[in-house]
Image: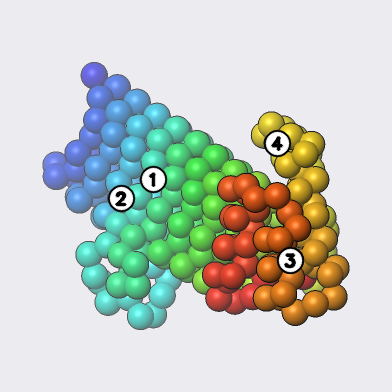
Amino acid sequence: MSKISPLAFIDPEAKIGENCEIGPFCFIDKNVEIGDNNVLMNSVSVLYGARIGNGNVIFPGAVISAVPQDLKFRGEDTTAEVGDNNKIRENVTINRGTAAKGKTCVGSGNLLMESVHVAHDAFVGNDCIIGNGTKLAGEIIIDDHAIISANVLMHQFCRVGGYTMVGGGTRFSQDIPPYTICAREPVAYCGLNLVGLRRRGFSNELIENIHNAYRIIYQGGVPLNEALQKVREEVPASPEINYIIEFIENSKRGFVH
């Protein structure tokens, strides 16, 4: 049985799962679905179009599924989807989608720290950490296991690869390749995320292969298509190396150097 404060408002059309805790002054709109074992602390707003999975903890002042801050939005029926076992801290805002993609998605196992903003049609993967005050613009993609530090500004349409570390205060308008550290002003490639890769169990041999791939890409002194071909020829093939190549080949905004 769920524990719901008498000071919370829940629309009769909202669907609430089992064993949820909903604190005082929460507002839960119609066309909302909340799964099991969620904790909504006081003053959380869950608005039209929210889809929340299981086992999430949402802290005071968070707003899930507010209408997009996009002048092209015309009231279309869209969603903001949150997976399982996330921690969504104070004053986080996750806007719902627009006609562009129809939904904003935050995966599972993420920590979104205080005052993070996730804009319309964004996609945040699994097991990511997004630091205090970071702002994610519309239609961005963050792959799994990324760490984005505090007060980062991520331009619309950009992508951050998996297992990355983006330094605090960084602003960027190009893609950040997987397994790297990027920081400074202007933003630059600062090497591999060695600590993160070792914590995730990457072997020394695999880390060395990733390092060699980026050495060819960043320091090879040849055009990009030749550098990627050289990576294919000289670095032992693996899913991680293929991921790097495909990420860079598919980059639409270019990638950080």
Q: Marks 2 and 1, Cα distance to the nearest angstrom?
A: 8 Å
| Of residues 174 and 48, the one drawn nearer to the viewer in this rendering | 174
- Which amino acid type corresponds to the residue marked 1 in the rendered image? Val
Residue hosting label 4: 202
Q: Position of residue 83 (x, y in %)?
A: 39, 41
Q: Position of residue 131 (x, y in %)?
A: 65, 48
For marks 3 and 1 on the same chain, the one whose residue lies earlier in the sequence? 1
In the figure, 39 relative to 125: above or below? above
Q: Marks 4 and 2, Cα distance to the nearest angstrom?
A: 36 Å
Query: Pointers 4 and 2 in contact (CB under 8 A)?
Result: no
Determine whether, in the image, residue 191 is placed left or right of residue 10: right
Residue hosting label 1: 82
For marks 2 and 1 on the same chain, the one whose residue lies earlier in the sequence? 2
Residue 37 seen in the current view: yes
- Which amino acid type corresponds to the residue marked 2 in the rendered image? Ala
Residue hosting label 2: 50
- Tell us which disc is closer to us: 2 or 3: 3
